[in-house]
Amino acid sequence: MSLSEDDLDPYDTDPIDRVEYTAEHYGWRFERVASDQIAIEIKAQWRTYSITLAWSGYDQTLRLICTYELGPTAARMPALFELLNTMNDRCWSGAFTWWEKPQLMVYRYGLILSGDMIASPEQIDTMIGSAVDTCERYYPVIQLVLWEEKTANEAMQAAFGRTFGRA
């Protein structure tokens, strides 16, 4: 089954309705938190991610926040902040941040739909998929820094370094 606008009401331009359509299409667990907000749970290889999408009519932005729990020790916080800077240098769409009080790693992204643009199901699918893929890509890096006490550069090299030679 392809994800397309054919099954959508052409007059329904509400971005959260379109996100709900995408969640139903994939069979993701979701809850419509408010008329302008939806929460989705997506299980991936490393984690189950909590994804919230919220529509702001004020600035016409569909905001995505992808979170997961993380409990770094106080001693590793400087290394985590250094890693976040390093990771964000490589992220061209979206960014990571740390929310201390709830102990959450956060990936954020905003899709600007100014001029009454409409988010297509494919755009929403790409937005959510990219968030999960990015979190999955960096999850091992974060683990290396927090639990194996690697530096940000060592962890990035271990996860993304090039392999030379033949096996």
Image (cartoon, grey):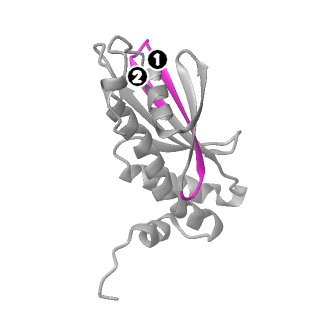
Q: Is residue 6 above or below residue 126?
A: above
User: Is residue 85 or residue 42 the one in the foreground?
Assistant: 42
| Disc 1 residue crowd, few under 14, some 14–19, many 20+, Cα 10 Å | some
Give the dominant element type of the magenta stretch: helix, strand or loop.
strand
Q: Is residue 56 magenta?
A: yes
Q: In what quadrant of the picture does the C terminus appear?
A: bottom left
Secondary structure found at label 1: strand
Q: Give the image location of residue 28, x and y in percent.
A: 54, 39
Work out whether residue 52 or residue 141 is closer to the camera in this orientation and state it: 52
Q: Who's the residue at 42% across and 44% down the image?
A: 129
Residue 85 marker: none
Which element carries disc 2, helix, strand or loop? strand
Q: Which residues are magenta?
A: 45-64
**Where residue 50 sits in the image (x, y, percent)?**
59, 40
Residue annotated with mark 1: 56
How far apart, in angstroms, are the residues tagged by discs 2 and 1? Answer: 5 Å
Q: Residue at x 55, y 15 (%)?
A: 35
Circle 2: residue type: Thr
Amino acid on which the number 1 mark rests in the picture: Ser
Q: Mark 2 and 1 residues: CB-CB less than 8 Å, in contact?
A: yes
- The structure residue drawn at horizontal position 68% and vertical position 56%, both measured from the top left corner, is 72
- Which of the two discs, 2 and 1, labels the residue nearer the N terminus? 1
Residue matched to label 2: 61
Q: Where does the image place residue 45, in percent across and percent down from the top left?
A: 54, 58
For the point 31% across and 17% down, the residue is: 114
